[in-house]
Amino acid sequence: MLEQAEVKSIDAILNDAQGQRGMLIAVLQKVQEKVGYLPEDAMQMISDRLELSFSQVYGVASFYKHFHFKPRGKKIVKVCMGTACHVRGAKAVLNELESKLGVKEGETTADRSVTLETVGCVGCCALAPVLTVNDQDLYGELTPKMVDDIIGTVRSEHGTHV
Ligand code: FES
């Protein structure tokens, strides 16, 4: 269920795009920026105002990996599962994160602080295995033992890098 403030924000976004189907992706983008993901109610509003069916809206949104349909955490932790990272133990790091956070890959912690995801090569193979936080901070040469500290830092704020 959308909060009143979210409905207002979405309304404002849609006021600029009323009936303009070509604006769908831009609208989806803006709504996700505001709400953090694309709730069903938001997609229904988009469908009504852009005069598209709900399945057209959902069809386009689900085509792009960038759009999300479930709430995400404040921090998005992505463990690289590219070849170099995989070979150097990324799976063990991922397993440890899953166990310590109490979520599986693709899920968000109940307090919405962290979403755990995997990603392909992020281009830092020399530091494998690596993970990123909010696509900004990079942690490299990971071992499962480092996971506790990393979670602590991630939950407090962005911190140490490599
Ligand atoms: S495979 Fe992980 S950074 Fe390249």
Image (cartoon, helix red, strand yellow):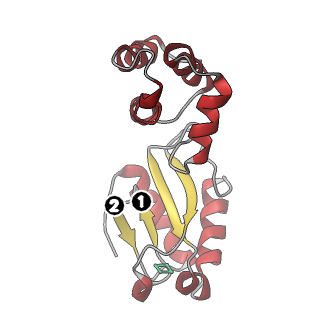
Residue displayed at 55% across by 51% down? 65
Q: Quadrant of the N terminus?
A: top right
Name the residue carrying label 1. 133
Q: Nearer the viewer, residue 17 or 22?
A: 22
* Residue 135 x/y as whole percent: 39, 59
Q: Secondary structure at mark 1?
A: strand
Name the residue that disc number 2 marks.
Answer: 136
Count of numbered marks? 2
Quick check: 76 left or right of 12?
A: right
User: Where in the figure is residue 13, as x and y percent of width and height?
Assistant: 37, 21
Judging from the image, what secondary structure is the residue with disc 2 in? Answer: loop
Q: Is mark 1 within 8 Å of ligand 1?
A: no
Q: Amino acid at mark 1?
A: Val
x%, y% of residue 90?
58, 78
The part of the image, by quadrant, that contains residue 99 is bottom right
| Dot 2 amino acid type | Gln
- Asked whether 2 or 94 is in front, the reply is 2
> In this view of the protein, can residue 69 be seen by the observer?
no
Q: Are marks 1 and 2 in contact (CB under 8 Å)?
A: yes
On the image, the x and y values in percent for residue 153 come to 39, 59
- Bin the neighbour count of mark 1 within 10 Å (Cα to Cα): few under 14, some 14-19, many 20 and up: many
